[in-house]
Image (spheres, rainbow, N blue to C red):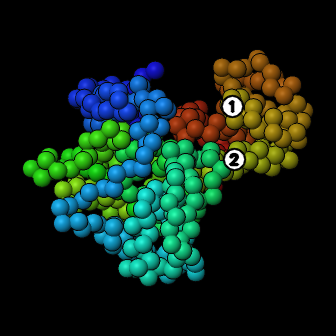
Amino acid sequence: MSLQCPICVGSAFDPVGRVPFMLGSKMHEHQIMGCRTCGHVMVDLRVITEELIADLYARPLDEQVWSTDGSSPYEDMVAFAADALETVRKTQQSPRIADFGYGRGEVLKALHQRFGVPREQLTGYDFAPLPLDGISTRTLRLDVLDEHAEQDAQFDLGFCSHVFEHIIDPRRLLRGLRNQARPGAYLYLETPDHSLLNDEVLSMSNQICPQHLHYFTVDRLAALARSCGWTVMREEVSLFGFVPRARLLLHREGGRDAIGCTRRFLTFRADLNARLSQTLLRLSESGPVAAWGAGTDLLLATAGDTVLAERVGAGRIIPHDRERAGERLAGALIQSSDLLSAASMPVVITPRPALTRLNMMKIAGKSGFAARVVDPYLS
Ligand SMILES: [Zn+2]
């Protein structure tokens, strides 16, 4: 099994260093690896067992120590997403505001106490939820909240702060959150940022610790979020006390729509295919018609339309093709396209690719029958 980067999916890594730690009475060690492609830093997960993870989290996480004066940035987290909060409160009668991995509930408390969000609009989700006064809490396996999980944790505004660095596969959590996001939803993400160092960070911060499996920077976190369909509205690296923070505000909407455009394109192509059949049927009402080119498009047209196939079989639509002359199509003999210039019937170009059609028009011009040629794909 090779180690795979969750961001670029590369598998070439260089060792960065080691993090030794005690668990029970046993010494362990994380190997820290750097992705050679995108620079993401992570623990070598190949040697991480479920048992080790269970032992690492056997007791609740230590409360994050942010600064020497005891101040904390939970209000500031909500303030970062204040515009999103205002938007969902304006557009939804009863918005669902959730904290995924809420810990001691500081963000939820700030939402209620400082930003006036009614308790009934708030939900806390966590692996082992602690009770919160008047705010509903639910157990949720955040590490497996992917698109296959049947979980109802829908939200209009979500917070997920200092969770991603603890998850083996952060992509599963991001996909899961994307799946639970209601139309128009926003998501606040925060992890430590491992690209910001000063003397205080070096001597005081706890960001290199055995429970951290991924060492994000704001740009790697944003790349990961974008790859799971989120639009980055705001990104920032900042320092609170001695904790360097990577902060993102994400929006469910705003991505460019390849699915919708591809559907439209395929519908348009189906309409073009129908135009070939319609043109051949219309022109063959009053007399024989040459179908020029006995390739994929004519085959598809005859396979999809029994009337068309019957007319080919009855000699009212006569397939012509230089390379396939002498073979049969829908029971009819394919004629050589060299015969087209001497004939007097209309000639319908059948291949859809534009370059082929342009070349056929040139040939018709040189051979003197361009006036009889019909391009069914031009409206
Ligand atoms: Zn990578």
Mark 2, residues whose alpha carbon is within 10 Å: few (<14), some, or many (≥20)? few
User: Residue at coordinates 26% horizontally, 57% vertically from top-left?
Assistant: 65
| Quadrant of the snapshot with the C terminus | bottom right
Image spot of residue 343 (x, y percent): 73, 33
Q: Is residue 225 left or right of residue 303?
A: left
- Amino acid bearing label 2: Ala
Viewer-nearest residue: 260 or 186? 186
Cβ atoms under marks 1 and 2 closer than 8 Å = no
Camera-nearest label, 1 or 2: 2
Image spot of residue 230 (x, y percent): 45, 55
**Residue 270's disc number:** 2
Res 327 → quadrant:
top right
- Amino acid bearing label 1: Thr
Viewer-nearest residue: 210 or 323? 210
User: Residue at coordinates 22% horizontally, 54% vertically from top-left?
Assistant: 244
User: Is label 1 in a helix, a strand or a loop?
Assistant: helix
Marks 1 and 2, Cα distance to the nearest angstrom? 14 Å
Image spot of residue 224 (x, y percent): 39, 46
Q: Is residue 213 left or right of residue 332?
A: left
User: Residue at coordinates 32% horizontally, 27% vertically from top-left?
Assistant: 27
Which residue carries the number 1 mark?
296
Image spot of residue 53 (x, y percent): 45, 36
Q: In the displayed structure, would residue 36 be above or below residue 376? A: above
**Whether residue 372 can be seen here:** no
Res 251 → quadrant:
bottom left
Res 264 → quadrant:
bottom right
- Chain-order first, disc 1 or disc 2: 2
